[in-house]
Image: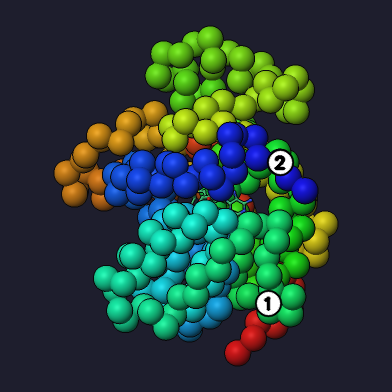
Amino acid sequence: MNGFIGDGGANGFNEVGAVYADHCDSARGRLRHDLVERRLRTELPGRPVEILDVGCGNGEMTIRLAMAGHHVTAVDPSARMLSAVAERLAARSALADRVRLVEAGVESLPFDRERFDAVCCHGVLMYLDEPGAALACLAVLVAPGGLLSVLVKNRRSLGVREALGGDYVTARRLIEAEPRTGVHADSSAGRLGLMTRGDDPVVLDRLAADHGLVPLPWQGVRIFHDHLDDTWSPEPEVYAAVLELEWAASGRSPYRDVGRLVHTLARRPGRSRT
Ligand SMILES: C[S@@+](CC[C@H](N)C(=O)[O-])C[C@H]1O[C@@H](n2cnc3c(N)ncnc32)[C@H](O)[C@@H]1O
């Protein structure tokens, strides 16, 4: 199915795991996870449920969801990423029986009969050639009443980070690129040094609907603070104000359209499992 647009798929992540972990610890990284977790908490039931986290990386969202009481199956094709999750879990023994680790990619998920109350795939599709095949693999695993949560690079805001950073040539190329024209004319190297591509939330909503899910309102993520670097280190009260500002803007156009990332959600109709 999908080819990896970067250089080496999961192996690419085997090399950049430490850099990614540092990013997750930064205020910029935390902002993204705080916003996505907040939205998930508003959509998930108050009781513990079964969650699949595909492309779990170093397990930041897996751990947050397990800490909220959920049972999480964390999947990643990178053995190094999974061992980073295992290491983090070892320091949190209370979570051990709430998290299961599985080495696999989105294209080879080994869950024939299992269905999940939520299927998350955050920060993964941007590394794949196109979103359709992955969406199909994820959607089929959503139980009745369950949620599909997908976080991608926002196709609508390509070039904004580059323009604000003064890289005007790249910004213009990205802004002028038609989707899927040229050889990845709309792709650029992300901060991890891997090539990434963007998706339009309306296209993802349509794909989810094609698989019988009902799209929910999408949110822009990291609208005003994406162009900063990972050394940005606001005081706690400033961070709290930033979080509230970003949250307020995340669901409102035109602000949400220029978020670096976009969080789309869709629900499978039906009664959720008790
Ligand atoms: C940027 S990290 C995102 C990690 C985490 N989901 C988060 O939001 O912090 C991307 C992850 O996708 C994983 N990945 C790469 N190719 C994949 C594939 N085909 N299927 C599933 N995950 C993949 C990488 O190994 C890496 O851990």
The structure residue drawn at horizontal position 58% and vertical position 13%, both measured from the top left corner, is 172
- Assess whether mark 2 and mark 1 are in contact (beta carbons under 8 angstroms): no
Examine the image and state in which quarter residue 126 appears: top right
The structure residue drawn at horizontal position 50% and vertical position 24%, both measured from the top left corner, is 160
Provide the secondary structure element on which disc 1 rests: loop
Mark 1 near ligand 1 (CB under 8 Å)?
no
Disc marking residue 245: none
Q: Is residue 220 visible?
A: no
Q: Position of residue 78 (x, y in %)?
A: 52, 54
Mark 2 near ligand 1 (CB under 8 Å)?
no
Q: Is residue 202 above or below residue 170?
A: below
Examine the image and state in which quarter residue 156 appears: top right
Real-space CA distance between mark 1 and mark 2, rounded to the nearest whole angstrom? 26 Å
Q: Position of residue 69 (x, y in %)?
A: 41, 79
**What's the amino acid at mark 2?**
Gly
Q: Is residue 105 left or right of residue 89?
A: right
Q: Nearer the viewer, residue 246 or 191?
A: 191
Q: Nearer the viewer, residue 63 or 87?
A: 87
The structure residue drawn at horizontal position 49% and vertical position 11%, both measured from the top left corner, is 168
Q: Is residue 28 left or right of residue 133?
A: left
Q: Is residue 228 visible?
A: yes
Q: Is residue 66 above or below residue 53?
A: below
Q: Position of residue 166 (x, y in %)?
A: 41, 13
Q: Which residue is mark 2?
A: 3
Q: Is residue 178 above or below residue 111?
A: above
Q: Nearer the viewer, residue 174 or 5?
A: 5
The structure residue drawn at horizontal position 45% and vertical position 66%, both measured from the top left corner, is 62
At label 2, counting other C-alpha atoms closer than 10 Å, the crowd grade (few under 14, some 14-19, many 20 or more) is: few
Q: Which residue is mark 1?
A: 115
